[in-house]
Amino acid sequence: MRIGFWSDKEYFLDRMNLRELTAAYFQYYAIAAYIAVSLVTGGIVLWGLATAAAPLWGVMASIIATIVIYPAVWYVLHRYVLHSKYMWKHPLTAGVWKRIHYDHHCDPNNLKVLFGALYTTLPTVAVATMPVGFALGGEYGALAALCTGAVTTCFYEFFHCIEHLGYAPSWGWVREMKKTHMAHHFHNENGNYGITNFLWDKVLGTFYEGAKDKPKSMTVFNLGYDEEVANLYPYVSRLTPNWPYNTNPVHRKREAAALKSAAE
């Protein structure tokens, strides 16, 4: 979808500052949808609390439970689903995998493929949070959990964007977060799955600080989907313009600059 601010511009985070990112962020349709969901569900829950229809402790427990389980859910999905080898093997899942993960690793600073797709992210948040909320607080607990999940997604997406901005954040903890995530994108994709929260990486032994701790991966940009794999499972390659192409974004920029220079 292309709406308003997003209609006819390219957004590359390594060429943007925080102000430009913020303007683009709040006008992206998926973020607007998460905010709308949080306002509607949060409003219903607040009305329920004000009229004593919603159980206070059930709602509070639902919010806390969502905050606790959210990073665990995204760790599991990132490590065992998005970095799996089966989504590209089937025509029904190959397009989804390309949109929400392959394109992001091929072009890590392209904002248009950094955001999770609304049609995959919002249902995932709902499935991950609402049953727990319902168990703890009934219907209002489920809505409180969904509201918390939507708000948390907004924060995760924003800090994920900041990790890809071409500058060193002034806050030390954000710098460390950025360094860790950049290692996942530019050094070795087999670790640091937490994106913005690396607690479960540390618990499960997939955390590493930098290049000295893990060998360089030859598949960090294509996630293993190369020409040999594409011959067997061509679904992603058919959806990729100019296939095959150099998946290393740094090398692609050099190639493009050389072609431009030669043309001039």
Image (cartoon, grey):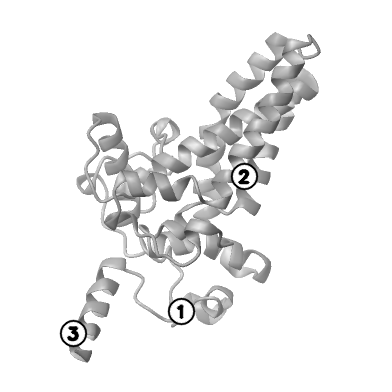
The quadrant of the rendering that contains the C terminus is bottom left
Q: Nearer the viewer, residue 222 or 249?
A: 249
- Where does the image place residue 192, in percent across and percent down from the top left? 38, 43
Give the Cα distance between marks 2 and 3.
Answer: 43 Å
The quadrant of the rendering that contains the N terminus is bottom right
Q: Nearer the viewer, mark 1 or mark 3?
A: 3
Q: Secondary structure at mark 3?
A: helix
For image coordinates 29% across by 48% down, the residue present is 17
Which amino acid type is shown beneath numbered disc 3?
A: Ser
> Which residue lies most toward the bottom here?
263
For image coordinates 45% across by 81% down, the residue present is 243
- Where does the image place residue 235, in percent across and percent down from the top left? 59, 75
Position above or below: 79 against 146: below
Q: Which disc is residue 33 wearing?
A: 2
Q: Is residue 195 visible?
A: no
In the drawing, does residue 90 fall left or right of residue 242? right
Of mark 2 and mark 3, the one earlier in the sequence is: 2
Q: Nearer the viewer, mark 1 or mark 2?
A: 2
For image coordinates 40% across by 44% down, the residue present is 22
Would you call the spot at circle 3 few (<14 residues within 10 Å), some (14-19), or many (20 or more)? few
Q: Are marks 1 and 3 in contact (CB under 8 Å)?
A: no
Would you call the spot at circle 2 few (<14 residues within 10 Å), some (14-19), or many (20 or more)? some
In the drawing, does residue 187 fall left or right of residue 23? left
- Where does the image place residue 250, in percent across and percent down from the top left? 26, 67
Give the Cα distance between marks 1 and 2.
Answer: 39 Å
Q: Report the residue marked by disc 3.
A: 261
Q: Secondary structure at mark 1?
A: helix
Of mark 1 and mark 2, the one earlier in the sequence is: 2
Q: Report the residue marked by disc 1.
A: 228
Position above or below: 245 against 20: below
Which amino acid type is shown beneath numbered disc 2?
A: Ala
